[in-house]
Image (cartoon, rainbow, N blue to C red):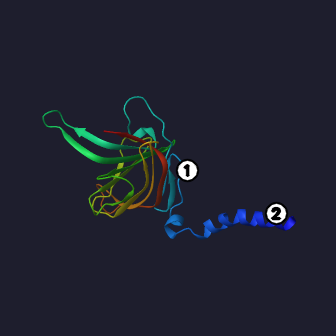
Amino acid sequence: MKWLNILIAFVALLPLYSCKEDLSPSDTDYPLAEPGFLAANINDFAWKSDPFKRNAGLLNEDDGAYATYGTFRYGAPPDTFALRNYLEIRAKQEDDTVRKHLSFYVYNVTGTGTKTTSSGELRGYFKHRLQSSTVFNDFSTEGMSGTLRITKLDTINHLISGTFEFTARHVSNKEQIMHFTKGSFTDVILFSFE
């Protein structure tokens, strides 16, 4: 009976050991952000967004980590323009000294997959400012490299997950560059509409 218990314990623990050995390099390169957050290394410093917290009024960049997906309509009839399968991912982190915003604008999203800045289907922006200032330092992926991989797009349970890496340049001082590596977002709230 003792050998049977040992065998059962061994068989029960074997899948846990095997999972660690089966991780692909891409799984270990991106430590997952906690559910509801977006995280990345910015110039090798760890950064994590605030969680989603709905403020009064329309959704805006001060609401923490969230995404919107669907068809956006611009203009007034008869000059209405519709942008279909459009995704925005936004995140904010704020403390007593600094406020930081990270945004992605992704085009032609029909499910999971990879989008790049070189394809024109991905744009990224980062801005930060000291709390004592009204001036933001703006960075853009325009003309730079970047990749965003959507690993989960769940419009039923309203969640999105994925990974990203990109390089952004200051919009005024072109010599100032920021590197965003090992970025991830896990089960961030997704508002979808048509």
In terms of depth relative to the viewer, which is nearer, 132 or 112? 112
Identify residue type, mark 2: Asn
Q: Position of residue 39 (x, y in %)?
A: 49, 53
Q: Residue at x 48, y 40 (%)?
A: 52
Q: Secondary structure at mark 2?
A: helix
Q: Nearer the viewer, mark 2 or mark 1?
A: 2
Quarter placement of the N terminus: bottom right
Quick check: 145 above or below 48? below
Q: How many marks?
A: 2
Describe residue 5's horizontal placement relative to residue 156 as left or right.
right
Q: Secondary structure at mark 1?
A: loop
Q: Position of residue 48 (x, y in %)?
A: 51, 51
Residue 161 has which mark? Answer: none
Of the image marks 2 and 1, the number of the one nearer the N terminus: 2
Q: Position of residue 62 (x, y in %)?
A: 42, 39
Disc 2 to disc 1, how far (Cα)?
A: 36 Å
**Dot 1 crowding, Cα within 10 Å, few <14, some 14–19, many 20+:** some
Inspect this view and state whether residue 177 appears.
Answer: no
Q: Residue furthest left?
A: 78
Residue 34 has which mark? Answer: 1
In terms of depth relative to the viewer, which is nearer, 3 or 102? 3
Quarter placement of the C terminus: top left
Inspect this view and state whether residue 30 appears.
Answer: yes
Q: Residue at x 69, y 67 (%)?
A: 14
Residue 5 has which mark? Answer: 2
Image-quadrant location for residue 28: bottom right
In terms of depth relative to the viewer, which is nearer, 15 or 71? 15
Q: Residue at x 22, y 38 (%)?
A: 74
Describe residue 41's horizontal placement relative to residue 172 as left or right.
right
Identify residue type, mark 1: Glu
